[in-house]
Amino acid sequence: MPELSGTAFLADLAAALEWDGGTLVEKTKLAGHEKWDSLGVLNAMTYVEDEFGLTLDFKAIERVVTVGDLLDLVAGRLDAQVT
């Protein structure tokens, strides 16, 4: 399983979302953005599953407001798998 690197995660997430609004940072707001629609959420979930072997449920995704929230969600799930 790949290690979670914030920089790589941000770049890969931007590619998965086809983000054209500049560089993603942890404070970037996803909620309400045109790229964070049902297809964008599905693309992000697929990226996380393919890259980290994690399945994110929709209830968890619904709580994501910023890129940092998504990063924390993935990091928390990875930590839970290790322990």
Image (cartoon, rainbow, N blue to C red):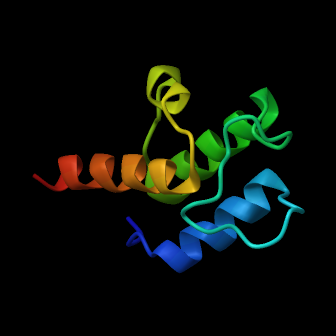
- Residue 52 is situated, as x and y percent measured from the top left of the image, at 45, 56
In the figure, 19 relative to 66: above or below? below
- Residue at 83% across / 59% down in the picture? 19
- Residue 4 is situated, as x and y percent measured from the top left of the image, at 41, 69
- Residue at 78% across / 52% down in the picture? 17
Horizontal side of residue 19 vs 11, given as left or right: right
> Which of 69/16 is in front?
69
- Residue 63 is situated, as x and y percent measured from the top left of the image, at 48, 30
Horizontal side of residue 75 vs 66, given as left or right: left
Say which quadrant the N terminus sits in.
bottom left
In the figure, 74 relative to 40: above or below? below
Horizontal side of residue 65 vs 63, given as left or right: right
- Residue at 44% across / 29% down in the picture? 60
In the figure, 66 relative to 12: above or below? above
Residue sticking out furthest to the left: 83
Residue sticking out furthest to the right: 20
- Residue 48 is situated, as x and y percent measured from the top left of the image, at 54, 50
Quadrant of the image occupied by residue 33: top right
- Residue at 53% across / 23% down in the picture? 58
